[in-house]
Image (spheres, rainbow, N blue to C red):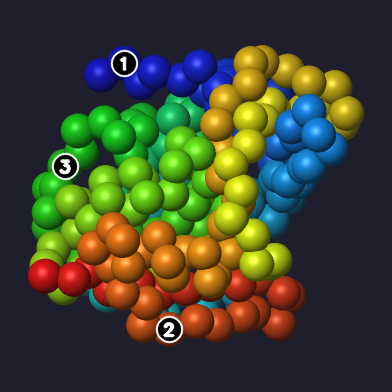
Amino acid sequence: MTVHDPQGWSSGPYAAAIRTQQGDLSLRDAEGWYLPLDLERWTAAADAGDRAVLRRCRGRVLDIGCGAGRLVEALSRQGHTVLGIDVCPSAVSATVCRGGAALHRSVFDPLPDEGGWGTALLIDGNIGIGGDPRRLLLRIRSLVHGHGQLLVETAQEDVDERRRVRIHVGRRPVGAFFPWAAVGAAALDRHARASGWTATERWSSAEGRHFLALRALA
């Protein structure tokens, strides 16, 4: 399957940073907004904030935008059936090298066992994928079963923003602009209720990361 990737995740600096496990990368728009891409943490082992997410996983797990595979690796070691998907081939390779299962797919591509996953994950800002949270939430609702759940890492601030961003190396832009979203917990709750989900739990890590658990509505 050919994965359409006009954003530049599949090659270039991001793919190289996944391979080398380092890089000064961020998403930035033309108005000064930016989101650092924490490659050092993403390519390391699961940390305490991650483990709080993993403890809440139930059933078969789909990690959307799995990156270098730290969550897939940790869940696999715990005995979960877990699949990572990512538009970056280097991320898929990294996940497989860590002993996990992963596919080179977008969440909007056809996926295995649609409607049968127990838990889906949107961690590390991946609620921003596609720049349209409701479209993303509706798509994921079709992937989990009738009592499935979605665990989302939200923005720290109470925001609900749509932006046109590019990947940057330092302050140098690379690639084309693409849509991205920044969504805080309150906004995510609103979008969830309009997309077939209900919020069941909200928590924060000691490192200042914020999360919301959503349950599918039958």
Type of amino acid at the residue the image marks with label 1: Thr
User: Which residue is painted at 35% across and 72% down in the image?
Assistant: 214
Type of amino acid at the residue the image marks with label 3: Pro
- Residue 59 point in image, percent of width and height: 21, 71
Against 206, residue 109 (above or below) is above
Against 75, residue 88 (above or below) is above
Q: Which residue is mark 1?
A: 2
**Residue 205 sits in quarter:** bottom right
User: Which residue is painted at 61% across and 80% down in the image?
Assistant: 204
Q: Which residue is mark 3?
A: 112
Q: Is residue 56 left or right of residue 48?
A: left
Type of amino acid at the residue the image marks with label 2: Glu
Disc 1 and disc 2: Cα gap in Å? 37 Å
User: Which residue is painted at 87% across and 31% down in the image?
Assistant: 170
Dot 2 falls on a residue whose secondary structure is strand
Q: Nearer the viewer, residue 119 or 203?
A: 203
Q: Nearer the viewer, residue 120 or 34?
A: 34
Disc 3 and disc 1: Cα gap in Å? 16 Å
Q: Nearer the viewer, residue 173 or 111?
A: 173
Dot 3 falls on a residue whose secondary structure is loop
Is tag 3's residue or tag 2's residue first in the polypeptide sequence? 3
Q: How many marks?
A: 3
Q: Quadrant of the N terminus?
A: top left
Asked whether the residues under the numbered discs 1 and 2 touch, taking CB atoms below 8 Å apart as contact, a structural biologist would say no
Q: Which residue is mark 2?
A: 201
